[in-house]
Image (cartoon, helix red, strand yellow):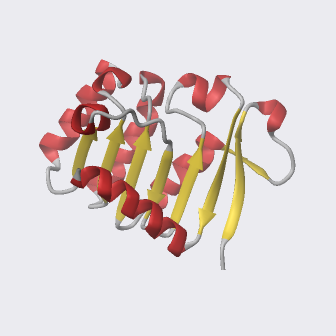
Amino acid sequence: MSRIKVVVTGPELMIHGTRGFETLLEEIISSAQEEIILVAYLITDAALHMIEILKRAIERGVKTSVIVNSVENVDKSVRRCFSEIQRKHPDCFRMIYCKEKTGANLHAKMVIVDRKKVLIGSANLSWGGMVGNYELGVLIEDGETAWLMARIADRIFQM
């Protein structure tokens, strides 16, 4: 049975039944046991604390894949963190830049955890996406949907 939670950014949108994007993202990344797939258009240094949570999951042995639109869409400080993670944990971490690999822009934003949960929304991993903008999303706790979304991400890696 699917469970769906509405996720928002912006205090004015926090009403009964919604969850904050940043808090929920931290929770699902921290709960990962086997795999995390992170798909993002933009990752700025405002997300460094989220990268640290991701790093802790990788240090626990959680296999992590990151797909970002383009190298220009990732702040240098974040690229350095990802490079360090790749160097220390090559068996648990892989990353690609979609535009450089496929020639197409990737505007999607989602996080898949253990192929059981998928968070899909409009928020980038940036100050605006996590704090400043009005962003909307859904957390779908349904293995079939999460598997399908993971297969789509896998296909991008295979291109």
Q: Give me the residue at 34% from left, 35% from top.
A: 104
Left or right, 104 with reference to 17: left
Left or right, 57 with reference to 113: left
Tell me how many marks there are: 0
In the rendered view, tell whether residue 97 sits above or below residue 58: above
In the rendered view, tell whether residue 11 sits above or below residue 77: below
- The image shows residue 66 at horizontal and vertical percentages of 33, 45
Q: Which residue is at the front of the view, 8 or 97?
A: 97
Figure quadrant of residue 1 = bottom right
Q: Give me the residue at 22% from left, 41% from top.
A: 85
Q: Give me the residue at 53% from left, 64% from top.
A: 117
Residue at the right extreme, as displayed: 16
- The image shows residue 52 at horizontal and vertical percentages of 38, 39
Q: Which residue is at the front of the view, 130 or 140?
A: 140
In the rendered view, tell whether residue 72 sits above or below residue 100: above
- The image shows residue 101 at horizontal and vertical percentages of 22, 38
Q: Give me the residue at 15% from left, 56% from top.
A: 91
Residue at the front extreme, as displayed: 103
- The image shows residue 98 at horizontal and vertical percentages of 30, 38
